[in-house]
């Protein structure tokens, strides 16, 4: 938020990136007042937080912005522009950018991007305000990738080598309007509506070679996939809340939402594959797979909360949801006329689903000093009506009724929650016909899938000591799932894998994150911040592969250490180190233990030998022992720049960047999936230079109605 108003959807990163730091008076982290107004029950421990940037007073009623552009070798370019008007009752923000590369210090990829957006906020009175936003996006890329997947079954290793070239392009238009009306200090009404249109297309050519460590080559093939889609979506939300004047802590609220999404797509597949086992055959696929998947969703929620006494709080909630989803799948083979007009009934189907959910919750909260304990019970009913087959040949109707208890404990900034839920299978998992768009990985649906039941635990909290500048925060999530949806896979002797979703019990997943930081100061000129963090993911899940059932235990742990040094804003140094360990073990001896360990060392440094000269450099080193010895095992990325500030008030900057100084940037990766190790490489740009110019447009008094804006010369030299 900026001055208490939304900024491009309350995206804090968007605000900090486009608003000069010297114009910001202070940064506030406060309770979300809108959330409190909607759900106020006297307990603010669950209220969300928002970041509000308060601008300096002399910025108000003025407009300012930034212009920048750069040209580089290999025809690289970048353009950026922003303009802002910030008044007490009116805000207008405009952003635009264009470039033909994207990425960060870890590597850059060739991609053309164009963006333009406008955001406004208008406060008509103390009780009435409006806001709106428009965003345009366009992008295209031409990327090469190479992958190697090793599947382990006992002492047999099946290795799939693939490489692909992908041409991607897309664009979108999104517009939204909203309003807020506070009839009085106790009544709040919000309304928002948005519309979006998206167009995407891609063309991928790939070559595949599959080997067996005993049998040699199993198959090889050439594939072409082309996909095009144009979609639209409409979303609308409204809410009203009321707090009783004579009964502090008593409130009622009502909210509703509606959305409609329409994303038809056409997937063309042309492939020629040679299979060597169990007998030499040639498999040719020429088909057009047309999918139409519109969806309509509506929900309405009513909430009542009453602080019965200083210690007891009553909460009640009723929610109704209705959704209608359609998945029409028509597959056409290429006919004698060389057109895709021959319907393949075996690869075509239709699924029409109507889903209704009604849940009612009643809960009691008990508060002792800073501790609040809430015990809730939710009765959930679900009606699911699935119609399969083109024309609705047969139907499957289900009814589910469940009572779910939940417990929440809040103490200061520490929260603990236990909850349960039941979710029906995704419509895309039910269609029984195969998806053979990738002839080496064929996916089936399963109309007999059962709903998934999950019990979740969450613990999170933070402690911050302003006097000692010490901060600790953490988060722990764990879940136990029955009737989870997993993939049952079969790998044929020719290397073609087929999979079908099935239900399985006994899944466990957990994630933990802990971070601590401490800042040291010396005479307000020297700052040293030490930060350490630890993230860990532990999971257990069954695997069904080639008729063998096993339990996979997975561990992913990643400690890191970061140092931030700031000496009088003339020397900034931020080194960091991270190690990531990924291990998987299996209950069946048919699968071998696998592990991947990576080390990342990096940092950035900024030097200001004079007030006008800035030297910057950032570098990273990654070591991955999974790769064979050579350049793939160790990756070094190094970027550097030198810039000078121009003019009396340093409102301009001339900068020379060198990306990939050593000219050896690469993007290699590896990860574990089920009983496989996947290794890959994707396109990155090699060394190039970029000369750029940035001009900060200082605050200029905004024109009043009926008065012309100052010309560009006056604009750039009026302070």
Image (spheres, rainbow, N blue to C red):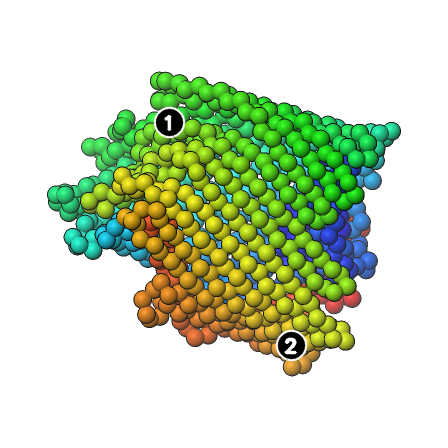
Specify the farthest residue to the right.
246
From the viewer's perspective, is 374 left or right of 153? Answer: right
Secondary structure, mark 1, is: loop
Q: Nearer the viewer, residue 57 or 404?
A: 404
- The residue under the point 54% across, 32% down is 421
- Asked if 655 appears above or below 359 in the picture, the reply is below
Q: CA distance from mark 2 to mark 1?
A: 62 Å
- Asked if 326 appears above or below 34 in the picture, the reply is above
Instruction: Characterize the local packing of mark 1: few (<14), some (14-19) or many (20 or more) Cα atoms within 10 angstroms.
Output: some
The residue that mark 1 highlights is 447
- The residue under the point 15% across, 45% down is 277
- Asked if 269 appears above or below 623 in the picture, the reply is above
- Residue 321 image point, x, y percent: 57, 26
- Residue 375 image point, x, y percent: 67, 33
From the viewer's perspective, is 540 left or right of 402? Answer: left
Within the image, what quadrant is residue 717 found in? Answer: bottom right
Within the image, what quadrant is residue 248 found in? Answer: top right
Mark 2 or mark 1, which has the lower sequence index? 1
Rendered image: mark on residue 65: none
The residue that mark 2 highlights is 571
- The residue under the point 74% across, 65% down is 468
Q: Is residue 699 visible?
A: no
Q: Nearer the viewer, residue 192 or 242?
A: 242
Q: Quadrant of the C terminus?
A: bottom right
Secondary structure, mark 2, is: strand
Q: Is residue 616 visible?
A: yes
How many tags in the picture? 2
- The residue under the point 45% across, 24% down is 353
Contact check, label 2 and label 1, Cβ < 8 Å: no
């Amino acid at each position: 938020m900026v001055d208490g108003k939304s900024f491009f959807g309350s995206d804090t990163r968007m605000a900090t990136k486009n608003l000069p730091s010297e114009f910001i008076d202070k940064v506030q982290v406060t309770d979300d007042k809108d959330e409190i107004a909607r759900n106020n029950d006297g307990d603010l421990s669950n209220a969300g937080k928002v970041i509000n940037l308060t601008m300096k007073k002399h910025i108000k009623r003025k407009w300012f912005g930034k212009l920048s552009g750069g040209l580089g070798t290999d025809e690289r370019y970048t353009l950026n522009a922003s303009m802002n008007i910030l008044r007490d009752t009116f805000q207008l923000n405009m952003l635009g950018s264009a470039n033909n590369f994207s990425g960060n210090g870890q590597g850059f990829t060739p991609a053309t991007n164009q963006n333009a957006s406008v955001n406004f906020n208008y406060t008509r009175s103390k009780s009435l305000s409006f806001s709106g936003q428009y965003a345009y996006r366009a992008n295209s890329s031409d990327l090469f990738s190479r992958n190697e997947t090793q599947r382990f079954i006992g002492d047999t290793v099946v290795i799939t080598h693939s490489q692909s070239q992908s041409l991607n392009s897309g664009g979108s238009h999104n517009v939204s309007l909203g309003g807020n009306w506070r009839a009085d200090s106790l009544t709040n009404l919000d309304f928002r509506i948005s519309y979006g249109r998206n167009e995407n297309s891609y063309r991928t050519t790939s070559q595949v070679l599959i080997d067996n460590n005993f049998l040699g080559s199993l198959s090889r093939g050439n594939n072409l996939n082309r996909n095009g889609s144009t979609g639209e979506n409409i979303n609308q939300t409204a809410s009203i809340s009321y707090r009783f004047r004579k009964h502090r802590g008593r409130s009622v609220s009502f909210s509703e939402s509606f959305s409609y999404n329409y994303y038809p797509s056409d997937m063309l597949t042309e492939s020629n594959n040679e299979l060597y086992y169990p007998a030499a055959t040639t498999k040719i696929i020429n088909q057009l797979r047309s999918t139409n998947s519109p969806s309509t969703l509506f929900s309405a929620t009513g909430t009542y909360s009453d602080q019965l006494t200083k210690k007891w709080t009553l909460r009640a909630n009723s929610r109704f949801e209705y959704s209608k989803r359609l998945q029409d799948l028509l597959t056409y083979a290429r006919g004698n006329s060389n057109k895709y007009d021959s319907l393949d009934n075996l690869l075509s189907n239709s699924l029409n689903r109507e889903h209704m959910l009604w849940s009612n919750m009643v809960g009691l909260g008990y508060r002792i000093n800073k501790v609040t304990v809430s015990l809730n019970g939710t009765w959930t009913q679900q009606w699911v009506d699935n119609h399969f087959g083109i024309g609705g040949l047969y139907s499957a109707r289900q009814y589910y009724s469940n009572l779910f208890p939940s417990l929440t404990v809040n103490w200061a900034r520490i929260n603990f929650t236990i909850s349960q839920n039941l979710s029906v299978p995704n419509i895309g998992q039910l269609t029984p016909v195969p998806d053979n768009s990738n002839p080496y990985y064929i996916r089936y649906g399963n109309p007999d899938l059962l709903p998934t039941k999950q019990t979740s635990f969450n613990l999170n909290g933070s402690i911050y000591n302003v006097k000692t500048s010490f901060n600790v925060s953490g988060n722990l999530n764990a879940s136990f799932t029955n009737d989870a949806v997993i993939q049952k896979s079969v790998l044929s002797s020719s290397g073609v894998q087929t999979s079908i979703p099935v239900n399985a019990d006994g899944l466990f997943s957990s994630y933990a994150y802990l971070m601590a930081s401490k800042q040291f100061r010396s005479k307000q000129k020297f700052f040293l911040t030490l930060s350490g963090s630890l993230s860990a993911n532990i999971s257990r899940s069954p695997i069904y592969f080639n008729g063998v059932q096993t339990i996979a235990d997975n561990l992913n742990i990643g400690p890191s250490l970061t140092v931030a040094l700031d000496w009088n804003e003339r020397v900034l140094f931020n080194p960091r180190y991270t190690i990531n360990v990924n291990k998987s073990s299996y209950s069946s001896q048919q699968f071998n233990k696998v592990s991947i360990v990576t080390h990342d060392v990096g940092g950035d440094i900024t030097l200001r030998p004079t007030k006008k000269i800035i030297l910057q450099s950032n570098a990273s080193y990654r070591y991955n022992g999974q790769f064979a010895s050579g350049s793939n095992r160790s990756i070094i990325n190094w970027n550097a720049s030198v810039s000078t500030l121009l003019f009396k008030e340093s409102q301009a900057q001339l900068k020379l960047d060198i990306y990939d100084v050593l000219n050896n940037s690469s993007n290699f990766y590896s990860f574990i999936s089920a009983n496989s190790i996947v290794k890959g490489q994707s396109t990155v740009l090699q060394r190039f230079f970029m000369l750029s110019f940035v001009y900060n447009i200082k605050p200029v008094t905004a024109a009043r109605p009926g008065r012309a804006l100052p010309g560009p010369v006056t604009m750039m030299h009026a302070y």
